[in-house]
Amino acid sequence: MTTKMQDHVRELMSKEACCTIQAHETLDRAAQLMREEGVGALPIVGSDGRFEGIITDRDIIVKCIAAGHDPSRVTAGDLASGLYSVSPETTVQEALDLMEDHQVKRLPVIKDNRMVGMISEADLAQNLPDDQLAEFVHRIYARASGKRGAGGGPG
C-alpha cells in the first residue's frame, strides 16, 4: 500500500488490540507489559478507559530509575505524558506534522476518548513511499540531534 499525504490515519494505523496500562499500575508492571507485548510504549488509560497519556520505556529509565525512584512505587499515571493523539479521520500529513512538532515517534489514535489504534514509525515505514519516509525521518531526527548532540534523540 502506498499512502498519500492526504490519506487518513485510519488507513495505516496499527489496528490490532492496543495493549494499555491503567494509570494506577506501577512502572515495574508497565515494563513487564512492554516486554510481554514487545513494545516500547504503552497508552495510559484511566479507570473509565479514557486515554490519559503515554509512557515509554525511556520514560521509565530516565524519569524514574535514573532519577533514583523505585519503579514498584511510581505509577504510570505519575509519569503520564504525551497527550498528543489523532483521530482516525486525521490526514497522514497532519499526523506527520504533529509527530515532528512534538518530537514523538508514536501517536495514539482516539475515537470517542477511546483507543482505536496507534500510528508509529513502523506503520510509516511500511506505508509511505521512500521519499516521504526519508523526509519525515530527516525532519524528526535532524531536529532532535540538534537539541541533544551526537547521541541524542527525542525525549
Image (cartoon, grey):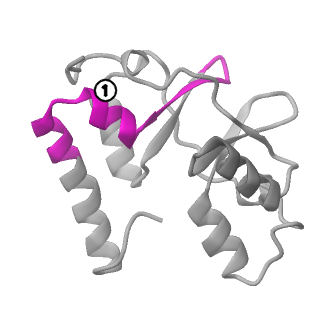
Position of 144 compared to 6: left or right?
right
Placement of 51 over or under 112, stated as above or below: below
Q: Position of residue 59 (x, y in %)?
A: 62, 64
Using the image as rendered, state which of residue 131 and residue 112 is in the foreground. 131
Placement of 63 over or under 114, stated as above or below: below
Placement of 32 over or under 69, stated as above or below: above
Using the image as rendered, state which of residue 31 and residue 116 is in the foreground. 31
Residue at the image point whose x is 32% and y is 49% from the top: 100
Q: Position of residue 16 (x, y in %)?
A: 57, 22
Residue at the image point whose x is 46% and y is 43% from the top: 106
Which image quadrant: the N terminus? Answer: top left
Q: Inspect the magenta stretch and tell me whether residue 120 lies in it.
A: yes
Q: Position of residue 136 (x, y in %)?
A: 22, 45
Circle 1 sits on which residue? 92
Position of 101 compared to 38: left or right?
left
Q: Inspect the magenta stretch and tell me whether residue 40 lies in it.
A: no
Report the span colored magenta: 111-136
Residue at the image point whose x is 28% and y is 16% from the top: 7
Using the image as rendered, state which of residue 135 and residue 28 is in the foreground. 28
Placement of 149 over or under 97, stated as above or below: below
Amino acid carrying label 1: it is: Val
